[in-house]
Image: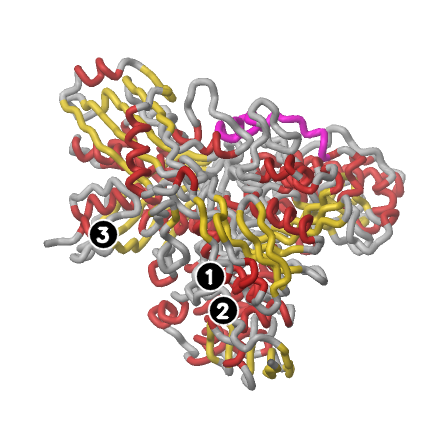
């Protein structure tokens, strides 16, 4: 079945099983491998992307539900003000260790900041606790979100 | 075919008395246990000129225009320095630490230093293992001298080149930030000297810098691999791609020795995109155009297993096996004084039993490997901790010579010891050989967790005798646990019958006690056991540091003071205890409801003390608010990495202490994914402060030593909060409920 959508600003059409999770369309059909497979059950957040600006777990998002939608992945999120600020803060604080979960962490953080310019620690708990990091970078993630928030408050 | 299938039946186990050429020697691994004892290994190899070609690859610059005096670095005319790292990066920071060490002695401009991953080659052997492998928190301490010598040799050759060009004596020249500088202020960049430097003889004994002259090492330094991990371009094993690959998902044997009884190949092949179904010793693989089809095909197999000897394996059976191990704990790991006398003379005797379960590693990136067997050549792309052994093992799998096995080491999405195992590289290689296609094998999360290699379960029975002042006269510990050494395939249990990994941290605990007997009884309930971040220390620190706390409370002495009194011969232990206690405000009162616990452990040549600040709610909920850690890892490379590794190791240990548990029922693992194998999440994250002891000691490891002290520090804080001693992991919240 043919499914069309916009990925990182580019129109794409895929001939694929509409029930296939969006994750595999991104990773295998489009070779956008920055989005990661972690659990396949929306439990770890490694596969987080934006669907019309909302964070979704792409491992549990059927391709059919992405039809006609705008998808943003880690490869494209730097083009948004929140994405730019978040990636800059991640680099400044040097958040990653193994790095495997960080695409998903960044996508969740960008969605949080796009909706709430100055999140509290409780907001961060709420938005980020679906993203597992086994290396234990949580305190650096929190610090980077506050840093990005300050950057955005100054006008990016 | 039969020969390699026999070999492939996991674990890959060379004959006990004939380690395979690529397998680590047990001597190497023993050296690892002794923490740094093997650092006297010859360092001649990395400087061998014949290996320089290894550092020449992928420059795009003709070799004649590149200065690559050894396997570890190359310098190009644009002044860029590329360091080639033979260790695998799994988050622990080796892709930054090794370049810092090379760049320091090279006197490079750090801004112009980049790093790339080495191929599998003996030039990159880890001197502590005698093979190219990453584990045991060894990378920095094993390469401490050789990679710095590699940098120093290059620097000396650059100086010699400038001296020749300027017709001055080399002793009048110095170097700074990528430049050779003459007495008159004349300067030449390293890039301008590459051609001339390459013609200089390689010095045999280049001088190393005095520590006071370090400009790079010892300073908090950002990672070289961060940008790629932030913009999505970093390539992990699972991201590897070659055109025409098939993705494989397997129905994996639920326990070692299980064999498929029946499966429906037709149903799997009916899934659109499925190309092949192949049975191999470890299970049945479905090969398809992509993961989704392969996964659906795998699920359609409807596979039934003959579980063999383990058909009725259960957690009760595991427990019975541990009890049997305790009965048979006759292998003596430590025997001083006479425990009978110690007990008879004691004013008071105490006993306690502690337990920990099997644990999964649960790295974020499910296990995977892309393999391509093409004629007599094998190429793999994998996040593996054992590149060297992979060459040997996969050459047997594909029946080619080891030199024909090319290992592309990808970034590891977490390792924690799991990626030291060869199962995923073996299966991918076998599937490529049998299918004739490049095959990317991906474990579903459920496979990663349920058909895994586990941290061993362990049970210890303690007895102690205290004198009338509450000081310990006698300590006896019987330990029952499966043997990692026996399961590893490349080690064996020594003649004294003690698996040193099962007792590490316990048999060699630092406390001064006149009469002691620590004994090991092997228990083998069945599941495959393996190295897990900090190995035996992960449970043994919990055991001994909790029990010492029990003794302190029995003696009615402050637990910190009690420890210090028994550690007079261990200044480094005292140092980290005192520093952690001071920074945590040990002697200062806490807000109502908050309580502290302390623990200390040495592992991998590094001492760590941690103070946990904890509260326990009426319904038994445990909150860890703050952890204060002090670390003495000897001489250091990157303090930022040290702080982050200790913090991360605390999180890893906390996940295990609060939630980690692999259990068995009817021969199968009961856990499958993060809902039933929970791990710490951001909303549960304590504040963590890490304080580094300034030290001139030999460098210690840093990837693992932060994990051992956290479980006992929290257990001891829970006791301080509730008066309840939790002697099992994970902590039983039910036991803490207030009626």
Q: Where does the image place residue B367, in percent across and percent down from the top left?
A: 54, 52
Label 3 secondary element: helix
- Which numbered circle lies on residue B733? 3
Q: Residue furthest bottom?
A: A68
Same chain shared by disc 2 and disc 3: no
Determine the chain carrying the residue at label 2.
A
Q: Mark 3 falls within which chain?
A: B
Name which residue lies at 86% across and 51% down.
Answer: B62
Distance from label 2 to label 3 (Cα)?
A: 33 Å
Please tell me whether residue A45 belongs to the stretch shown in magenta: no
Tell me which residue sits at (53%, 35%) in the image.
Answer: B699
Depth check: B536 or B262 in front? B262
Q: CA distance from mark 3 to mark 1?
A: 27 Å
Q: Residues within 10 Å of mark 2 (few under 14, many from 20)?
A: many
Q: Is residue B45 magenta?
A: yes
Residue at 60% across, 41% down:
B386
Residue B437 picture location, percent across and down: 70, 55
Chain letter belonging to callout 1 = A
Q: What residue range appears in magenta?
A: B26-46
Instruction: Read off the residue under disc 1.
Output: A39
User: Mark 3 or mark 1: which is in front?
Assistant: 1
- The reply to the same-chain question for discs 1 and 2 is yes
Give the structural element (helix, strand or loop) at label 1: loop
* Kind of element beneath mark 2: helix
Quadrant hosting residue B335: top left
Is B144 displayed left or right of B524 in the figure? Answer: right
């Amino acid at each position: 079945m043919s499914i069309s959508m916009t990925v990182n600003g580019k129109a794409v059409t895929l001939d694929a099983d509409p029930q296939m999770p969006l994750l595999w369309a991104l990773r295998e059909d489009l070779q956008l491998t920055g989005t990661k497979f972690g659990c396949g059950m929306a439990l770890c957040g490694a596969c987080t992307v934006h669907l019309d600006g909302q964070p979704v777990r792409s491992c549990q998002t059927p391709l059919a539900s992405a039809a006609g939608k705008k998808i943003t992945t880690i490869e494209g999120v730097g083009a948004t003000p929140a994405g730019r600020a978040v990636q800059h803060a991640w680099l400044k604080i040097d958040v990653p260790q193994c790095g495997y979960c960080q695409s998903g962490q960044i996508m969740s953080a960008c969605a949080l900041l796009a909706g709430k310019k100055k999140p509290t620690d409780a907001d961060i708990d709420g938005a980020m606790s679906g993203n597992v990091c086994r290396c234990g970078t949580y305190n650096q993630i929190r610090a980077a979100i506050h840093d990005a928030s300050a950057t955005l408050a100054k006008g990016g | 075919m039969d020969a390699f299938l026999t070999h492939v039946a996991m674990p890959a186990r060379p004959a006990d008395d004939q380690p395979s050429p690529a397998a680590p020697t047990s001597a190497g691994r023993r050296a690892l246990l002794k923490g740094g004892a093997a650092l006297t290994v010859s360092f001649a190899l990395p400087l061998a000129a014949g290996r320089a070609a290894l550092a020449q690859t992928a420059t795009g610059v003709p070799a004649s225009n590149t200065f690559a005096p050894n396997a570890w670095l190359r310098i190009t005319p644009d002044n860029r320095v590329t360091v080639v790292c033979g260790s695998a990066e799994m988050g622990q920071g080796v892709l930054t630490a090794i370049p810092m060490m090379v760049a320091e002695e090279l006197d490079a401009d750090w801004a112009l230093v980049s790093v790339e991953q080495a191929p599998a080659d003996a030039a990159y052997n880890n001197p502590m293992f005698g093979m190219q492998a990453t584990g045991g928190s060894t990378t920095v301490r094993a390469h401490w001298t050789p990679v710095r010598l590699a940098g120093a040799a290059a620097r000396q050759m650059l100086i010699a080149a400038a001296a020749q060009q300027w017709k001055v004596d080399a002793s009048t020249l110095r170097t700074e930030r990528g430049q050779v500088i003459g007495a008159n202020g004349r300067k030449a960049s390293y890039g301008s000297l590459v051609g001339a430097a390459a013609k200089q003889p390689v010095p045999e004994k280049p001088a190393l810098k005095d520590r006071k002259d370090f400009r790079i090492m010892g300073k908090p330094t950002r990672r070289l691999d961060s940008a790629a991990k932030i913009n999505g371009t970093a390539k992990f094993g699972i991201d590897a791609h070659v055109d025409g690959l098939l993705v494989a998902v397997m129905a994996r044997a639920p326990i070692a020795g299980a064999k498929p009884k029946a499966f429906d190949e037709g149903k799997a092949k009916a899934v659109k995109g499925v190309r092949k179904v192949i049975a191999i010793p470890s299970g049945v693989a479905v090969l398809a155009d992509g993961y989704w089809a392969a996964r659906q095909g795998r699920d359609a197999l409807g596979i039934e297993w003959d579980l063999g000897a383990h058909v009725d394996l259960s957690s009760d059976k595991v427990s019975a096996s541990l009890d049997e191990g305790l009965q048979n704990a006759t292998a003596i790991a430590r025997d001083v004084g006479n425990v009978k006398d110690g007990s008879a003379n004691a004013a008071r005797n105490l006993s306690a039993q502690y337990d920990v379960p099997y644990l999964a590693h649960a790295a974020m990136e499910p296990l995977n490997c892309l393999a391509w067997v093409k004629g007599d050549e094998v190429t793999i792309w994998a996040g593996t901790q054992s590149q060297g052994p992979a060459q040997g093992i996969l050459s047997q799998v594909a029946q080619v010579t080891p030199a024909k096995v090319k290992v592309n080491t990808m970034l590891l999405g977490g390792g924690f010891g799991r990626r030291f195992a060869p199962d995923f590289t073996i299966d991918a290689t076998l599937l490529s050989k049998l299918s004739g296609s490049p095959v990317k094998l991906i474990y579903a999360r459920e496979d990663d967790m349920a058909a895994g290699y586990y941290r061993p379960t362990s049970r210890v029975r303690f007895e102690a005798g205290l004198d009338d002042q509450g000081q310990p006269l006698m300590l006896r510990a019987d330990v029952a646990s499966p043997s990692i050494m026996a399961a590893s395939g490349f080690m064996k249990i020594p003649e004294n019958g003690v698996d040193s990994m099962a007792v590490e941290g316990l048999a060699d605990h630092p406390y001064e006690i006149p009469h002691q007997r620590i004994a090991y009884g092997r228990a083998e309930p069945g599941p495959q056991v393996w190295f897990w971040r900090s190995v035996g220390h992960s449970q043994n620190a919990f055991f001994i540091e909790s029990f010492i706390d029990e003794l302190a409370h029995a003696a009615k002495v402050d637990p910190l003071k009690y420890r210090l009194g028994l550690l007079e011969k261990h200044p480094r232990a005292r140092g980290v205890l005192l520093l952690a206690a001071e920074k945590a405000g040990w002697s200062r009162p806490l807000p109502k409801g908050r309580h502290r616990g302390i623990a200390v452990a040495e592992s991998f040549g590094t001492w760590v003390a941690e103070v946990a600040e904890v509260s326990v709610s009426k319904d038994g909920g445990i909150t860890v608010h703050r952890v204060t850690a002090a670390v003495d890892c000897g001489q250091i490379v990157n303090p930022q990495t040290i702080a982050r590794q200790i913090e991360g190791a605390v999180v890893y240990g906390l996940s295990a202490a609060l939630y980690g548990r692999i259990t068995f029922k009817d021969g199968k693992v009961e856990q499958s994914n993060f809902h039933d194998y929970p791990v710490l999440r951001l909303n549960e994250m304590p504040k963590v402060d890490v304080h580094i002891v300034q030290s001139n000691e030999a460098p210690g490891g840093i990837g693992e030593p932060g994990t051992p002290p956290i479980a006992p520090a929290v257990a001891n804080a829970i006791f301080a909060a509730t008066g309840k001693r939790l002697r099992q992991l994970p902590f039983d919240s039910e036991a803490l409920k207030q009626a």
